[in-house]
Image (cartoon, rainbow, N blue to C red):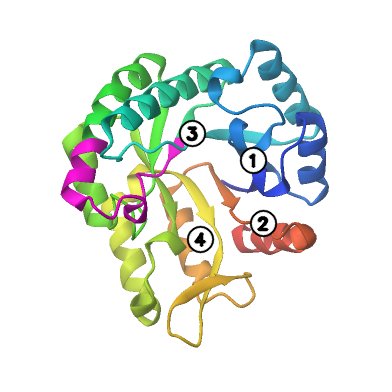
């Protein structure tokens, strides 16, 4: 039910054939692909041609790599209205590319509050809601799932607020990207099972994309990036909860340490057995 994948652009930007061959060599079975970050010459989803789509599909198939999700990361909660409108336009184009690719999901975050310190979360939430009301009709028409990711310093910063957002939007095509590290605060590390239980109780049925990365507590008492071996996250507990969902999910390694790619793929495969 669980397959191990990598975020494609962690391996740099390249042509599809070279990129996916390299990822497959490390033992990853799947990718999450953001064309504008991973493929040479592509700066937006408007640059993606039918020829490139076909070339990408062939390269994935040749290397035995599955894909469920395109990364279409746009600032949907930005309070600058012109920037927001442009983000929505680009996001909808990403949905069109996903449909042509035969990919069922697109993933996005919900805008970091650090990017707009003058804004309140309420203002960002209002903008995010406006964006999603413009996006979801097209997603529903094309039957593409839009997966939003709660992050503790973004517009949707808690499982509770993410649940409220889903309930407000009322669309079967609005789902969740779950990244444990992005929900975890340093103060919650010792009681993290409570956070994971709450997250799965509120959002488990809606989780369609999963990201995995590592984090540790530094000398200042704050969280910082770490490899899996030194991470404070209880991965076996999370994987147990994911297996209980009974869904065919891709577990996407985010922030791949490329020099240790084989080791990381092996770690995740053992974890997900």
Q: How far apart are labels 3 and 2 at the CA level?
A: 19 Å
Q: Tag 3's secondary structure?
A: loop
User: Which of the two discs, 3 and 4, sits closer to the camera?
Assistant: 3
Residue at the spot 58% in from the left edge and 54% down from the top edge: 254
Q: Earlier in the sequence, mark 1 or mark 3?
A: 1
Q: Is residue 110 magenta?
A: yes
Residue 73 visible to the viewer: yes
Find numbered disc 2 in the image and state the secondary structure of the residue it sits on: loop
Within-10-Å neighbours for mark 4: few <14, some 14–19, many 20+: some
Query: Badge 1 is on which residue?
Result: 31
Residue for point 76% across, 45% down: 23
Q: Residue at x 53, y 68 (%)?
A: 236
The spot of residue 224 in percent (x, y) is 52, 73
Q: Position of residue 56 (x, y in %)?
A: 71, 24
State the separation of the CA atoms marked 1 and 2. Answer: 12 Å
Magenta span of residues: 107-128
Task: Tell whether position 124 is magenta.
Answer: yes
Q: Pointer 1: residues within 10 angstroms few (<14), some, or many (20+)?
A: many
Secondary structure category for the residue under label 4:
helix
Of the image marks 3 and 2, the number of the one nearer the N terminus: 3
- Name the one closer to the observer, 97 or 211: 97
Looking at the image, residue 134 lies above or below residue 28: above
Residue 178 spot, x, y in % from top left: 42, 52
Up/down of 52 relative to 25, above or below: above
Badge 3 is on which residue? 72
Instruction: State if disc 2 and disc 1 touch (CB < 8 Å).
Output: no
73 on left or right of 35: left
- Disc 1 versus disc 3: distance between alpha carbons? 14 Å
């Amino acid at each position: 039910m669980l397959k191990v994948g990598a975020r494609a652009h962690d391996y740099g930007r390249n042509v599809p054939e070279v990129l996916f061959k390299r990822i497959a060599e490390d033992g990853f079975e799947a990718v999450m692909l953001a064309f504008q970050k991973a493929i040479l010459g592509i700066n937006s989803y408007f640059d993606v041609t039918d020829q490139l789509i076909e070339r990408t599909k062939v390269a994935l198939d040749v290397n035995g790599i599955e894909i469920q999700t395109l990364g279409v990361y746009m600032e949907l909660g930005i309070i600058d209205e012109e920037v927001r409108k442009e983000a929505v336009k680009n996001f909808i184009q990403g949905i069109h590319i996903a449909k042509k690719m035969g990919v069922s999901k697109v993933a996005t975050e919900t805008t970091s509050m650090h990017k707009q310190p003058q804004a309140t979360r309420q203002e960002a939430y209002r903008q995010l809601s406006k964006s999603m009301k413009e996006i979801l009709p097209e997603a529903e028409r094309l039957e593409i799932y839009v997966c939003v990711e709660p992050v503790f310093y973004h517009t949707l910063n808690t499982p509770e607020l993410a649940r409220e957002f889903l309930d407000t939007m009322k669309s079967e095509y609005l789902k969740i990207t779950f990244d444990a590290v992005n929900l975890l605060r340093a103060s919650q590390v010792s009681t993290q099972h409570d956070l994971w239980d709450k997250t799965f109780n509120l959002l488990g049925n809606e989780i369609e994309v999963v990201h995995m990365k590592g984090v540790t507590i530094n000398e200042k008492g704050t969280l910082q990036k770490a490899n899996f071996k030194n991470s404070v996250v209880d991965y076996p507990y999370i994987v147990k909860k994911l297996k209980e969902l009974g869904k065919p999910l891709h577990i996407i390694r985010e922030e791949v340490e490329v020099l240790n790619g084989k080791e990381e793929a092996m770690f995740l495969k053992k974890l997900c057995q």
